[in-house]
């Protein structure tokens, strides 16, 4: 496993934490039957998770990323007790999730981006009332938590709307609130900003920052949006083909994968490729493509876009620009290349 971790609490490696969440050699193997002829089927093993070990300290916010099918959701399901590991040892707050799922449920909150925990035909408010009863939340605490979530996640006008009538982004905000009503110690978020517009994403990220800072909630976040990781997490783990490939800082991941961000620049008119020399060696960015007045410039993902934007704005007739984050699959592919002998 590639590891450029740092040792301070909340920043670094799976080694040296208090082990609030602990995985030691955890495996999950599925038996899959496949056609092997007209009437015959063969059984194959699929290793969704293959010997993963890490620890997460109480109060950490950790990004858990990887391409589709890497084993992220399977890991989360084992951490919640939905799935039982095929091998290894797993504990959350000292509890074995698969053996004490009901006990653990009162200490964790879960948001799966593509699946809702809300009641489909009921108004949002009624779903929350049911959870109030299910988790036996004290009335005062329930109302305080609900009021806070409604305000910060902008749910006021949605409380009387049936869940089936909510947009994906609205439902996501509703699900996040539902996961927090019982004051969980651990929050698992699977693609929490999927389907959200820019403003809603910013609100959710700020809400999660405050939740972690004020209540010390431990957060494990899976996402395809590296901006989520960049703004929320000081530590990131990369999983691929069921194995942990990297555990460290996001900047370290970009360095290992030599990943690049893309600056898309719209000029007032068509011009030759932008050329910006730095004071040190080499240019600030390289031009990847030019189409009329639009140009694509690649620059190291670990670098700030601010100096590049300032130079372009000062030296070129700028109309608009946007920054595109590196694709996770591309970062992982470069990691493989860097690790190859």
Image (cartoon, rainbow, N blue to C red):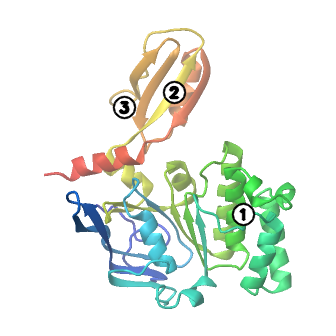
User: Mark 3 and mark 1 in contact (Cβ < 8 Å)?
Assistant: no
User: Mark 2 and mark 1 in contact (Cβ < 8 Å)?
Assistant: no
Q: Secondary structure at mark 3?
A: loop
Q: Quadrant of residue 277?
A: top left
Q: Disc 2 marks which residue? A: 264
Residue 15: image x %, image y %?
36, 76
Q: Residue at x 78, y 84 (%)?
A: 133
Check the picture and name the quadrant holding the N terminus: bottom left
Residue 78: image x %, image y %?
45, 76
Q: Nearer the viewer, mark 1 or mark 2?
A: 1
Q: Which mark is residue 280?
A: 3
Q: Is residue 308 above or below residue 153?
A: above
Q: Is residue 261 above or below residue 272?
A: below
User: Mark 2 and mark 3 in contact (Cβ < 8 Å)?
Assistant: no
Query: What is the C-alpha distance between the residues marked 1 and 3?
Result: 58 Å
Q: Secondary structure at mark 1?
A: loop
């Amino acid at each position: 496993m590639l590891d450029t971790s740092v040792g301070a609490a909340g920043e670094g490696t799976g080694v040296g934490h208090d082990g609030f969440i602990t995985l030691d050699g955890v495996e999950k193997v599925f038996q899959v039957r496949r056609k092997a002829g007209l009437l015959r089927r063969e059984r194959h093993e699929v290793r969704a998770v293959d010997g993963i070990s890490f620890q997460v300290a109480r109060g950490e916010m950790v990004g858990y990323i990887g391409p589709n099918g890497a084993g992220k959701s399977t890991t989360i399901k084992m951490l919640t007790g939905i799935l039982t590991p095929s091998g290894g040892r797993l504990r959350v707050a000292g509890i074995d999730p698969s053996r004490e799922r009901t006990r653990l449920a009162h200490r964790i909150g879960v948001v799966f981006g593509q699946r809702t925990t809300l009641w489909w035909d009921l108004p949002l408010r009624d779903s929350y009332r049911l959870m109030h009863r299910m988790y036996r939340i004290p009335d005062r605490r329930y109302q305080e938590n609900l009021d806070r979530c409604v305000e910060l996640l902008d749910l006021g006008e949605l409380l009387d709307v049936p869940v089936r009538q909510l947009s994906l982004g609205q439902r996501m905000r509703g699900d996040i609130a539902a996961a927090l009503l019982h004051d969980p110690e651990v929050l698992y978020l699977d693609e929490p900003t999927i389907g959200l517009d820019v403003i809603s994403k910013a609100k959710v990220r700020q809400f999660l920052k405050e939740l972690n800072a004020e209540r010390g909630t431990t957060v494990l976040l899976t996402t395809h949006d590296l901006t989520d990781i960049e703004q929320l997490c000081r530590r990131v783990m990369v999983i691929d083909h069921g194995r942990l490939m990297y555990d460290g800082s996001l900047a370290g991941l970009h360095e290992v994968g030599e990943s690049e961000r893309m600056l898309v620049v719209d000029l007032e008119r068509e011009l030759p490729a932008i050329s910006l020399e730095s004071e040190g060696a080499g240019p600030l960015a390289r031009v990847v493509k030019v189409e009329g007045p639009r140009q694509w410039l690649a620059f190291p993902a670990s670098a700030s876009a601010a100096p590049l934007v300032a130079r372009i704005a000062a030296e070129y007739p700028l109309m608009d620009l946007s920054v595109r984050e590196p694709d996770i699959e591309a970062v992982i592919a470069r990691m493989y290349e860097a690790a190859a002998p």
